[in-house]
Image (tube, grey):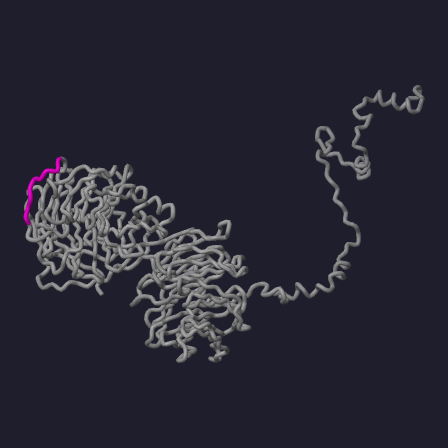
Amino acid sequence: MIKSSKIFVGYRALGFVCNHVPLSLRYINRRNENLVVTAVGKSFHTYGCSKLDLLSVSGQHPEEISCLTSDAYLVFTACENVIYAWRRGTELKHVYKGPKENVLLLLPFGPHLIAVYEDSTLIVWDIKAEEITVEIPFTNISISAIVHPSTYLNKVLLGSRQGCLQLWNLRTNKLIYTFDGWGSPVIVLEQAPAVNVVAVGLECGDIYIHNLKFDETLMKFSQDWGAVTGLSFRTDGPPIMASTSTMGHIAVWDLEKKRLHSEIREAHKGGISGLKFLPNEPLLITSSSDNSIKIWIFDLPDDGGRLLRLREGHSGPPTKVRFYGVNGKSILSAGRDSTLRSFSTEADNLNKSLGQASFNRKAAKRKGVKHDTKKMLPILDLCSEATREKDWDNIAAIHRNSKIVTTWSFDRSCMGEHKIMHQRFKGLKNVEALCLSISTCGNFVIIGYNTGHLDKFNIQSGMHRGSFGKEIAHDGSVRGVAIDGFSQMVVSGGSDKLLKFWKFKDHSEIASMELEQSVSKMILHLESAVLAVAMDNFKIVLVDIESKRIIREFTDNAGSVCDMSFSADFRWLIAATSDSSIKTWDISSGKLVDWFTVTPLCVSLTMSPSGEYLATVHAGSPGIYLWANSTLYSNVLLHPLPELYDPLQLDLPMITMDGRNENNEVTIEDEADDSVAEFKSPEQISDELVTLSLVSKSHWLNLLDLDIIKHRNKPKEPVQVPKNAPFFLPVVSGLKPTFLVEDSDSWKEKREKSNILDVMQHKSEFYKILFKSNETENSLQS
């Protein structure tokens, strides 16, 4: 399909993390890091486990990925009946086209790849040659799980929907043994750290630890949350196994005591599809269909788990999207999961969650969001003003079937304290807030209701500051409201086909204008003071709020208007309609200049204040799609489209990496070289076995003759200690000073002398004569 229209080019998609396809874990030696691979629609993502940062995004597949797996060299994905092998997560290396049936399971098997198809045909592919080496059709069982038992050469264990297990030798194509099973379909098979032992997860919720060698069940566990969707064992010491269910719970089992150790309730909002313990680490990584990846660490005093890292997006499709601020770098998105999120157009690590809407935020914070029983219904509309974001709440939102308007703080990234509601509606049912608008000063919010009331509140205190009209502003529901850029005028549109103008301060009516049909939606361009009004007859009119007259009318719509947006320079009006169209009108000429269709339907759109991007959200998709404005970097001639113009069908933008993370991408040097798949055996396989040395023959040949060698190498004479030189060398004074050389005997005598000073030292000659005569008792002779 064509990738661009006259104005907009698909740029990238935001907010995608994972889906229902189980994750795959791989270790890159040169990065010294575990990588997790998740499927996202027609592509897959690779994340680093150290920070959960996005490392690479694969190319697009023809259809959505049904299953994936990986080894140290390649990532394997299956799309319908075709298998793809990827290098570095982005480079396509091999393609394997099998039978017509879709691929159900994949398992790397050394230099081969095992694929199980929906008709229970097992095919072994040669990875490099892209050829089928073994093909085994199964007619009596339906394969539902597969695992390679450790140390079982050329053998795989197959689990079936009938409940039995079969051990096959793929080299001889023979069935070795059939295990009876436990009367429930097998969902998961996982190799235990012990040899000959596997864990079997059943659809009924039972978990069996089974010894394959003796066909004996070692222990049994049972979870009450439905089918077992994942099993994993800790390998860093403690005998722990984790299991998951379709309800989003995690159970932690103590294998030594054979009982439940702990549990993590509502770890995910949806069913958990992926579960893996990181090798030799107390870290557990999970993925779910709720579009989130979580890493849990088991470091609590009771060895329980807590959340360590998280990466998530909307678990439900967004309902409203708006750019925040004047720089156009942040997008506010409200989803059906009752959360409000901010997505950055520059870097994914700047994305943040503002929280989940709750009637009692303090209780939800104390108990945890996942245990919140007071969760509000999804947000239908929102507005924001960045002027006073540091001072108080600056975002207001209305909820489905609710008369309460909630406030949020972008700076503090949380829900505000105020629940805005007029006292007249207290205790009344069937009252809904339908539209709202925040003043440019950031102090007031005006809310329109289905009862026809139009009220003004102070957003800082949440107090009521007046109502428009004597009793009600419109005879029917108020469907749109806007405040001009100077906070002097308020414009409201209702189901009574009237457009009314009010003074902002005293709330008095200035004028009114009758339209052809009831107002459906309204947006205001502040700088030009022009209001775009969409009506129930699919028409869009532009109204100058100063002169209070219609200046443009656009009638070429075949469906109701879902959302509208002005370009920042007031050059275009962009609208999404219910016929899956996105149209752009040139305001100066009043002509349609761009028109394309997308699937699925666009439910909301917004143009960035800088004019760079158009952001759209679509029915059934949890992501936000960015379209680049091509007129900013190329010359585009926008001629009016002919009346019988056939719109272009465009693909939604693909998921790509942001510029800040390009340096973290997995490179060729990081990945292992698959040219020689060399097996590395552990140094000591078992304590009961003798491990042979791999050193050369010269190192061990003379070990028996060590005594003879030592005797032969013994020195004939004792080792002579070298003479120590004096610290100060003696010098003979004279015209030419020379060193005083003493013979070895005199040096030896000095060495043998005591350290006590000699009494004759430093004495005169006369003293020496007297001392000598005293010893000889002959003074006259002296």
Q: Nearer the viewer, residue 697 or 280?
A: 280
Q: What is the quadrant of the N terminus in the image?
A: bottom left
Viewer can see residue 704: yes
**Magenta stretch, residue numbers:** 506-514
Quadrant in the rendering for residue 705: bottom right
Q: Residue at x 71, y 35 (%)?
A: 727
How far across and down, in percent of the image, does residue 428 sit?
20, 47
User: Quadrant of the rendered structure where residue 35 is?
Assistant: bottom left
Q: Between residues 177 and 128, which one lies in front from this camera angle? A: 177
Quadrant of the frame with the C terminus: top right
Q: Residue furthest front?
A: 427
Residue 253 screen position, x and y as percent: 49, 59
Q: Is residue 184 magenta?
A: no
Residue 507 located within the stretch drawn in magenta: yes
Above or below 172: residue 494: above
Residue 458 placed where, x, y %? 22, 38
Measured along the vertical axis of the image, is residue 216 above or below residue 450? below
Residue at 9% across / 64% down in the picture?
A: 644
Picture mark count: 0
**Front residue of this view, candidates 503 and 60:** 503
